[in-house]
Amino acid sequence: MSHHEPLIRDSLSGKVLMNTEVKAERCYQCGKCSAGCPVVDQMDIPPSQLLRLLQTEIPSNDEKILRSHTIWLCLNCEMCIGRCPMEVDIPPMMDFLRSESIRRKMVNPKAGNIIAFHRSFLESIRYTGRLFELGLVLSYKSKTFHLFQDAGLAPEMIAKGKLGFIPERIKKVADMKRIFSRTLKKGVQS
Amino acid sequence: MKIGFYPGCSVDGGSREYKESCRALAKAYGIELESVPDWNCCGASAAHNLNRELALALPARILSLAEKAGMTDLLVPCAACYNRLMLTQHELMKDETLRKNISEVTGLEFKGTCSILNVVHWIQKWILPELPEKIKKPFDYKVACYYGCLLVRPHKVLKFDRPEDPQSLDEVMKLIGATPVDWAFKTECCGAGLSVSKTDVVADLSGKIVRDAVYRQADALIVACPMCHSNLDMRRREINGYLKQNVSLPVIYVTQAIGLALGIDRKELGLHRHFVPVNLPEKAEATK
């Protein structure tokens, strides 16, 4: 086995490889991902450091990653993979780490708003097939109690014809039901 | 001439001026944009943040429906939708087992025959050839072309001209008479999916973009993505708060800028829907 393979199949690094084909072991810590990351200053663990933690294959480090704020802040802007000399594809790895963090119930408490937003978004399309922007915002507000956030935007959006009041529904909503029930497993649903 | 069209939720909703300007431009060329029948949401950041299979299945349904309708060229003006559709097509075409699994989920066959076009590629293929003779009023302004992330990355899949200092949008703008400025934030992220859940981060990221465009003396920011537009335009109050000054720099879709050069009515291009008023310097108004 080359040093580009995780040593322990059960380690987080092993799971990342199995699920996303991303080899964290390839990272040699040049730090370009962290240098280019637009939200690195908000992160608790910079992306290059997260890769280093993965490489150790130590359970407590794996847990540190899954409990981090970093995995939820990542915008998937793909700047890191654009610049990585070793082509370590961080964005799909982050997607996997997020779902793993939910599965193992290790979600960082600061990520509440972000997850609430994603869930409100998916709920909206699950029942109608298309995103209903007003519904999304209202559902998000009810989940987070940020009742007055962005309330000031609404009147101007209405005046400019940017805010619809009636959700658009696709004809075959049954297709959405089928797709959602066959993909979303326990733990991802709200 | 008919070509396939996937508007996506935000171009169909809050960013409708983008759709209006795409349609206005198509009309001026006698192109009919035919929407994918019964299209659904692509899942955007929400789906791939939470579930990979869902993030593949939602775009796969759209592409299958477009294939079934016989669409070969499919215009996807939203950079975020474009990114999801391209990545899905790429993933499904390189892995037969995955393709079968996802077809099983959607209940629809997927062949991967659609040529998915972002707005810049659509303009290059369908609009540029006859552009010079159609120009009525050159768009004679200094512009900062903002590409953002999802149009250009990941380069391996999207193959946009070049990842760090892309040029195609600048080239299009030059053709309608604009002068693109050289600036540093062409492909920096605006904050996209965190617009509602982390507005402070968005004000910071988008604020830096607006500040550099102003510093380079651009008359307008040119965009090709509804997420970028809403962050740079609708979130201007938060951006101004971050910059501690009021910036009046307008944010214009590339399709609106071309539309203005073709002499299309401002209202037809949806320019009245912007939060930051599109007041360009006097010179061009004078040639009206």
Image (cartoon, rainbow, N blue to C red):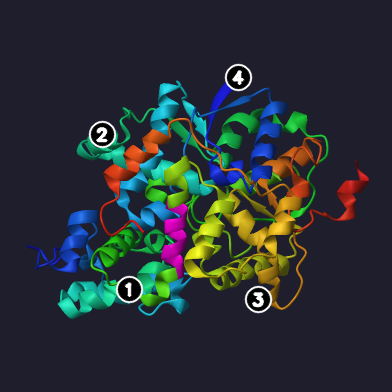
Q: Amino acid at mark 3?
A: Tyr
Residue mark closest to the camera, 2 vs 4: 2
Instruction: Sort mark 2 into few (<14), some (14-19) or many (20+) by Cα contacts within 10 Å.
Output: some
Q: Which residues are magenta?
A: A113-122
Can residue B39 be seen at all in this image of the molecule?
yes
CA separation in Å, label 4 and label 1: 50 Å
Tell me the number on the disc at residue B198: none
Is disc 1 in contact with disc 3, using a CB cutoff of under 8 Å?
no
Q: Chain of mark 3?
A: B
Say which label, 3 or 2, has the lower sequence index. Answer: 2
Q: Quadrant of the N terminus of chain A?
A: bottom left
Q: State the SS at label 3.
A: helix
Does A93 sit left or right of B14 as displayed? left
Instruction: Give the residue drawn at x 74%, y 43%.
Output: B270
CA separation in Å, label 4 and label 3: 47 Å
The residue that disc 3 covers is B242
The residue that disc 4 covers is B1
CA separation in Å, label 2 and label 4: 34 Å
The residue that disc 2 covers is B104
The residue that disc 1 covers is A48
Q: Amino acid at mark 4?
A: Met
Is disc 2 in contact with disc 4, using a CB cutoff of under 8 Å?
no
Residue B247 picture quarter: bottom right
Say which label, 2 or 4, has the lower sequence index. Answer: 4
Same chain assignment for discs 3 and 2: yes
Inspect the magenta stretch and tell me whether residue B201 lies in it.
no
Note whether A153 is above or below A160 in the view shown.
below
Q: State the SS at label 4.
A: loop
